Every structure is written in structure tokens, then in C-alpha cells.
């Protein structure tokens, strides 16, 4: 049984993530999408919202499960008994950090394999951080995220704006 884990902060899930996880899903028997904490990033969506949205968009893929955790990736991978971590590489700019994280994780957990998959070129310029920035300033994010995610983010931001004006 090939059980792989696709970790990220997914704040929000983008079309690039959907492409990667669909391709990884075809290569394994079970894919666990893990919403983890990235201390280097500021959040827009709550972890529970990110999980619910990934389930809505990708939950119909057989053998796909979405989980959330505040623990280390290697601890989560061990808990769910995943043999392989899948991460995406958009451009060569991603490679330094991804290789460093892969080597840190493989040192912490030598049995854990790390697979770096290149993003489809049409999505290589998309990042969740820029999507958050564009959405927070009222820009159109429809080219970067699935429609369900766009609708949810716009609703959450409208709610926040309403709270601020009260
Ligand atoms: O989508 P992101 O923000 O690039 O994902 C990064 C993430 C969440 C996978 C990474 O920050 C992570 O693994 N966080 C969990 C804590 C951890 O294991 N840190 C050590 C990384 S070597």
C-alpha cells in the first residue's frame, strides 16, 4: 500500500496545488493532504476552514484524506504511516528551500522518502501568499484558485470588512 503525504499550509488551496495533488494521487494508493503550520507565513484562513475547503474541492478523489496538525511533518507522516512526502517545485527559486526541508526531514526520519514534483507550467507563477495579498486588496483571484475557494475567501473577507466597519 503506497500511502503518501502532501503537506502544506494551503492558505488557500490554489490551482497549482490541485494539479499537483491530482497527479500525485494517480501515483499512489492513498494520499493524505496535511494542513500544517508554517511559522514563516501569516494566515488568512483558519486551519479548519482550509481543511473543509480542500475536502469540498478534492474530497471525491478515492483514497484521499485531509488532516490538520500543529506537529512536525515527520511526526505527522509517522502517525499516519506515510512512506513518502510529495512537494511541488514551481521554479528553480523553490528548490533551495525545498531541498533543505527534504534533507532536514530525511535526517529526522531516515525512512521517509521525499518526492519533489514540478508544477504544471501554467500554474508555476501562482503562490498562496500572492493570492492572499491580491484577495485582501479586493483583486480578482479567479485565475489562481478553484471557484469554490474564491467564493469562500470573498465571503470571509467581506465578513471581516463588515466587522471592521461596526
Ligand atoms: O505550503 P507551505 O507553506 O510551503 O508548506 C510548508 C510546510 C507547512 C509543509 C512546512 O512549514 C512544514 O513542514 N511545517 C510543519 C512543521 C515542520 O515540520 N517544520 C520543519 C520543516 S523542515
Image (cartoon, grey):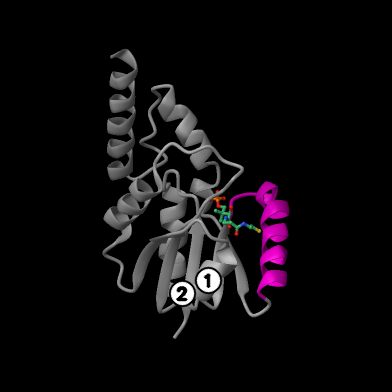
Q: Counting other residues with Cα less than 10 Å from the Cα at mark 1, is it few (<14), some (14-19), or many (20 or more)?
A: many
| Frontmost residue, 145 versus 30 | 30
Q: Which residues are magenta?
A: 89-109
Q: Is mark 2 within 8 Å of ligand 1?
A: no
Q: Which residue is mark 2?
A: 80
> Was residue 154 drawn as part of the magenta stretch in this picture?
no
Crowding near the residue tagged with mark 2, few <14, some 14–19, many ≥20 C-alpha atoms within 10 Å: few
Across and down, in percent, residue 9 comes to 49, 50
Q: Which residue is situated farthest in the top direction here?
A: 165
| Residue 95 included in the magenta stretch of the image | yes
Q: Is residue 56 left or right of residue 99?
A: left
Q: Could you tell me residue 117's position as x and y percent?
A: 57, 63
User: What is the number of callouts on the image?
Assistant: 2
Answer above or below: position of 115 versus 97: below
Q: Position of residue 51 (x, y in %)?
A: 36, 53
- Which residue bears the numbered disc 1? 77
The image's mark for residue 137 is none
Amino acid at each position: 500500500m503506497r500511502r503518501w503525504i502532501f503537506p502544506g499550509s494551503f492558505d488557500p488551496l490554489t490551482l497549482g496545488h490541485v494539479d499537483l495533488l491530482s497527479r500525485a494521487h494517480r501515483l499512489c494508493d492513498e494520499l493524505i493532504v496535511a494542513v500544517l503550520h508554517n511559522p514563516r507565513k501569516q494566515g488568512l484562513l483558519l486551519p479548519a476552514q482550509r481543511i473543509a475547503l480542500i475536502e469540498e474541492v478534492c474530497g471525491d478523489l478515492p483514497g484521499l484524506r485531509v488532516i490538520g496538525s500543529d506537529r512536525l511533518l515527520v511526526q505527522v507522516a509517522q502517525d499516519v504511516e506515510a512512506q513518502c512526502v510529495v512537494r511541488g517545485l514551481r521554479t528553480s527559486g523553490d528548490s533551495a528551500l525545498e531541498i533543505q526541508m527534504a534533507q532536514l526531514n530525511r535526517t529526522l526520519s531516515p525512512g521517509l522518502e521525499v518526492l519533489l514534483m514540478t508544477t504544471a507550467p501554467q500554474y508555476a507563477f501562482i503562490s498562496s501568499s500572492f493570492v492572499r495579498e491580491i484577495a485582501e486588496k479586493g483583486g480578482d483571484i479567479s485565475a489562481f484558485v478553484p471557484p469554490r475557494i474564491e467564493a469562500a475567501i470573498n465571503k470571509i473577507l467581506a465578513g471581516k470588512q463588515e466587522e471592521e466597519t461596526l
